[in-house]
Amino acid sequence: MTDRPVIVARIARAHGIHGVLLLDAETDHPEALFREGRRLLVVGGAPAAPSSIRLTGARPHGARWMVTVEGIGDRTAAERLRGGNLAVPRSELPHLDEGGYLLGDLVGAALVETGERLGTVRDVYDLPAGPMLSVDVEGRERLVPFDPGFVVSVDLDAREIHVELPEGLLDI
C-alpha cells in the first residue's frame, strides 16, 4: 500500500474560549495518534485552514478527544478548523496484524459472489451499526453490509471481496 494520508479524526467543534478542539476519532488507536508533539495533516474544512497542526495536548473527553493545538489560542481560530479531517501518513499508523487492512483499502475492490463480479466498491461508510460498502452495480449505488454474515473473505492482493448475499439484496 502507498503512504497516502489516512484520516484518523474529524474536527467536531471548538470547546471553550481558549482554542481547544473536540475530535471524533476515526481510529481504533487514538491514544497512539493523539498525543503531545504529534503533527497531523489537515484535510478539507475551511480554505484558510493550515495544511498541518501540531498537538500540544490531548486527552479523552467522553466519546471524543479534547486537543490543544500550537498556534490556536482562541475559540475563533479553533472554529476555523471545524469540519476538517485530520490525517497521518499510512506509515505512521500503528502496525496492522497479518492480514489486517483499513476500511479505505476496500475502495476499488471488486465484489464477487460465486465467481461472478457484482460491482466495484466506491466508498465505505463507517456507521454505528457497522461498516457499509457502497458498491457500483451497473452504474447504480447499492449498499452491502460489511459483515461476517455476508463477507466470506477479503483478498487485497487480488482486489476482491468475496460475499454470499441474500436473494434480492442488490435489488433494494
Image (cartoon, grey):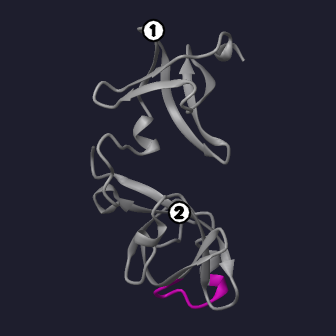
Q: Position of residue 43 (x, y in %)?
A: 48, 60
Extreme residue toward the front, this view: 149
Instruction: Please give the name of the residue rendered at 45% of the width and 63% of the height, measured from the top-left corner.
Output: 29
* Whether residue 164 can be seen here: yes
Which amino acid lies under the numbered mark 1 shown in the image of this protein?
A: Thr
Q: Is residue 139 above or below residue 146?
A: above
Q: Give residue 59's quadrant in the image.
A: bottom right
Task: Identify the disc placed on residue 81.
Answer: none
Q: Position of residue 117 (x, y in %)?
A: 45, 12
Q: Is residue 94 above or below residue 3?
A: below
* Whether residue 51 can be seen here: no
Q: Is residue 69 above or below residue 151?
A: below
Asked if the magenta segment contains residue 12, the reply would be: no
Q: Give residue 76's quadrant in the image.
A: bottom right
Q: Position of residue 134 (x, y in %)?
A: 57, 31
Instruction: Please give the name of the residue rendered at 46% of the width and 43% of the height, measured from the top-left corner.
Output: 103
**In-image side of 6 versus 9 (left or right):** left
Query: From mark 2 to mark 1, how far is it between C-alphas?
Result: 37 Å
Judged by depth in the image, the label closer to the viewer, 2 or 1, is 1
**In-image side of 19 versus 55 (left or right):** right
Query: How crowded is the residue under tag 1: few (<14 C-alpha within 10 Å), some, or many (20+)?
Result: few
Badge 2 marks a residue whose secondary structure is strand
Q: Determine which residue is flagged by label 2.
A: 9
Query: How crowded is the residue under tag 2: few (<14 C-alpha within 10 Å), some, or many (20+)?
Result: many
Instruction: Please give the name of the residue rendered at 70% of the width and 87% of the height, measured from the top-left corner.
Output: 16
* Residue segment shown in magenta: 68-76
Which amino acid lies under the numbered mark 2 shown in the image of this protein?
A: Ala
Q: Are marks 2 and 1 in contact (CB under 8 Å)?
A: no
Asked if the magenta segment contains residue 72, the reply would be: yes
Q: Is residue 14 above or below residue 7?
A: below
Q: Determine which residue is flagged by label 1.
A: 114
